[in-house]
């Protein structure tokens, strides 16, 4: 049985959280999840609370959250639910864009797609949003 006050090595924490040792070091260096303590030799040690935070970090990364979003959730500036709702909207937007690209690609590879006239008009009928004119 493990105690609440027990400190774990970074290797043990890596096995428990399914994060790499280098990822745990990165999160510590970035101040996202700091070690609970250090050994006399300077090795990082983590308690169960830090491990729980690292598991949350892993979950947030799996959802596509960046460091700034992770920091906001850990600091209780936003909730996991709110972050998930925001990311869901972004994913749905990207999905619509990919569907439009797929339709354009299917159109450009269909019968008669090799003709020069269909090449010139493919962009106009692709369903993709128009890009602003380049100013360079």
Image (cartoon, rainbow, N blue to C red):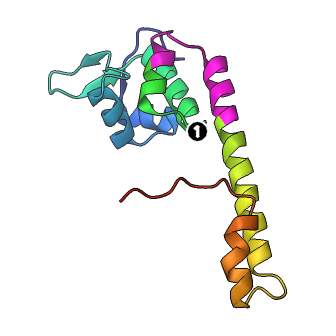
**Which quadrant, please, contains the N terminus?**
top right
Residue sitting nearer the eye, 112 or 132: 132
Check residue 133 for magenta coloring.
no
Residue 42: image location, x then y, percent? 17, 26
Residue sitting nearer the eye, 63 or 59: 63
The secondary structure that most of the magenta stretch takes on is helix
Q: Is residue 76 above or below residue 52?
A: above
Disc 1: which residue: 62
Q: Which residue is rendered at x = 43% and y = 20% of the image?
A: 71
Q: Which residues are magenta?
A: 72-89
**Left-right relation of 77 to 96:** left
Q: Which residue is rendered at x = 48% and y = 11% of the image?
A: 3
Residue 6: image location, x then y, percent? 40, 14
Q: Is residue 112 above or below residue 53?
A: below
Mark 1 lies on a secondary structure that is helix
Q: Is residue 112 above or below residue 48?
A: below
Residue sitting nearer the eye, 30 or 84: 84
């Amino acid at each position: 049985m493990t105690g609440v006050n027990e400190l774990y090595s970074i290797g043990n924490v890596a096995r428990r959280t399914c994060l790499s040792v280098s990822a745990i070091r990165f999160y510590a260096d970035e101040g996202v999840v700091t070690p609970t303590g250090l050994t006399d030799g300077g090795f990082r040690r983590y308690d169960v609370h830090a491990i729980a935070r690292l598991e949350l970090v892993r979950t947030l990364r799996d959802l596509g959250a960046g460091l700034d979003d992770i920091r906001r959730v850990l600091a209780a500036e936003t909730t996991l639910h709110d972050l998930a709702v925001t990311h869901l909207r972004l994913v749905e937007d990207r999905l619509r864009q990919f569907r439009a690209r797929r339709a354009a690609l299917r159109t450009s590879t269909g019968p008669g797609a090799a003709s020069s006239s269909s090449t010139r008009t493919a962009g106009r009928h692709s369903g993709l949003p128009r890009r602003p004119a380049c100013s360079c």
